[in-house]
Amino acid sequence: MTPSNLSPADRRRLDELYKRLGACSARNVGYPTNQAFDYSELFRFLEFSINNVGDPFHSTNYRLNTMEFEREVLADFARYTRAPEGEWWGYVTSGGTEGNMYGLYVARELFPDGICYFSEDTHYSVAKVLRLQHTATS
């Protein structure tokens, strides 16, 4: 949608949102985000519906993907953590909740009778995911 397709009311709402987000970002503390990152080099990619659907190490019929870059990121993390060559796998998640969800899913599949222990300081998504998976907790 181009700006010319927006109604004046919608344009005002978006302008107000932009102002509010700008004001909030100047004083955003306590959450692990990088407020100083310059994304302008990446703006041109917003015109594409990029989706890394599926396993980054297998081909997909959806060609608008960045799986080559995803594999490079994974290889970097494998190197940083000294993962044995050929003995690692992964994918880049959209955030902590998805990462926790996949980790807990794998744990449940490997240990179907397992119990998950976690503290009150654990990321909020862990309890939510465990409830969704009907995983025992203590």
Image (cartoon, rainbow, N blue to C red):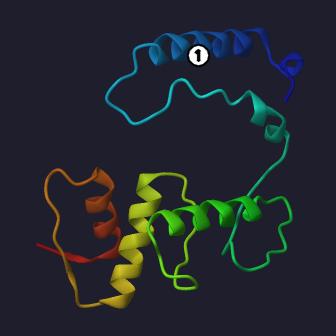
**Element type at mark 1:** helix
10 Å crowding of disc 1: few (<14), some (14-19), many (20+): few
- Residue at 76% x, 64% y is 68
Tell me where residue 9 sits by quadrant.
top right
Q: Nearer the viewer, residue 131 or 39?
A: 39
Q: Which quarter shows the C terminus? A: bottom left
Q: Nearer the viewer, residue 29 or 50?
A: 29
Taking the image as shown, residue 28 lies to the left or right of residue 14, namely left
The residue singled out by tag 1 in the image is 17
Q: Nearer the viewer, residue 4 or 51?
A: 51
Taking the image as shown, residue 77 lies to the left or right of residue 117, namely right
Q: Is residue 35 above or below residue 19?
A: below
Residue 26 in picture, x, y percent from top left: 46, 13
Residue 101 in picture, x, y percent from top left: 41, 66
Q: Nearer the viewer, residue 48 or 136?
A: 48
- Residue at 76% x, 58% y is 66
Q: In the rendered structure, which amino acid carries the disc numbered 1?
A: Leu
Residue 127 in picture, x, y percent from top left: 25, 61
Q: Is residue 6 above or below residue 113?
A: above
Number of callouts: 1
Q: Is residue 47 above or below residue 130?
A: above
Q: In the displayed image of the protein, which residue is found farthest to the left?
A: 138
Q: Is residue 100 above or below residue 42?
A: below
- Residue at 41% x, 80% y is 106
- Residue at 55% x, 72% y is 90
Residue 111 in picture, x, y percent from top left: 30, 89
Q: Which quarter shows the N terminus? A: top right
